Image: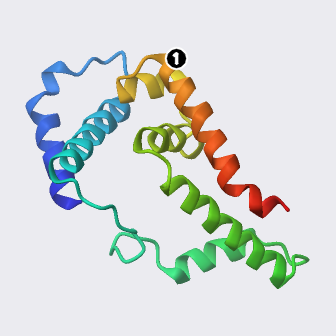
Amino acid sequence: AEDLAQDAFVKVLNHIDKYSPEFKFSSWLFKIANNVAIDHLRRRKLDTISMDGSPHATTASEVEASSLELVSEQESALDEMEAKELGSAIERAIAALRPEYRACIMLRHVEGRAYEEIAATLDLPLGTVKTYIHRARHELRKALEPLRQ
């Protein structure tokens, strides 16, 4: 990951003259980093692995501390455990999506980006972004259906 980040920043420096100020710099940077990661995966055909063991991952105590802040005093331990299980199930369902669907969902629902910005960031037509998000939501709904019962 560090090598890919370094490669992305080298590409940014080498192509800074191609940056257009009409777009957000963060979107342009994300697009380059995304392309570097996709190129790496295509070239190496690597299996993806969990970030849980990464030194950059949030520690269990940090997660626990942040989730304790969100839990009201009236919420029981059972409710808290169910919420954590649901969160884990959602993360697994998102991780199981096709990479292009996952990227669109993360940009839309985690980062709160507009459809147009996602299209520019991923260099996709607007209609394709909307289709990917629709299909990803459908797949997530199917994957999470057993939890709704």
Residue 49 position (above or below residue 101)? below
How far across and how far down the image is residue 18, in percent?
17, 19
Which coloring applies here? rainbow
Residue 85: give x, y in percent of width and height.
Answer: 68, 72
| Residue placed most toward the observer, 114 or 148 | 148
Q: Residue furthest right?
A: 74
**Whether residue 119 is situated above or below residue 73 in the rendered picture:** above
Between 145 and 78, the one lying in front of the other is: 145
The answer, for residue 24, to whether it is visible in the render is no
Residue 31 figure quarter: top left
The residue that appears at 85% across and 62% down in the rendered structure is: 149
Residue 80 percent across, percent down from the top left: 77, 76
Q: Residue at x 40, y 69 (%)?
A: 50
Residue 108, visible in the rendered structure: yes
Secondary structure of the residue carrying tag 1 is helix
Q: Which residue is mark 1?
A: 127
Along the horizontal axis of the image, is 35 left or right of 140? left
In the rendered image, the vertical position of residue 108 relative to residue 6, given as above or below: above
- The answer to whether residue 50 is left or right of residue 149 is left
Residue nearest the viewer, comparing 83 with 43 = 43
Q: Residue at horizontal 8%, vertical 32%?
A: 14
Q: Is residue 98 above or below residue 13?
A: below
User: How many numbered marks are there?
Assistant: 1
Label 1 CA crowd tier, 10 Å (few <14, some 14–19, many 20+): few
Quadrant location of the N terminus? bottom left
- Percent coordinates x, y for residue 109 in the rendering: 60, 42
* 43 displayed left or right of 141: left
**Can you name the residue that lies furthest to the left here?**
14
Q: Residue at point 50% right, 26% down?
A: 129
Amino acid type, residue under disc 1 in the picture: Gly
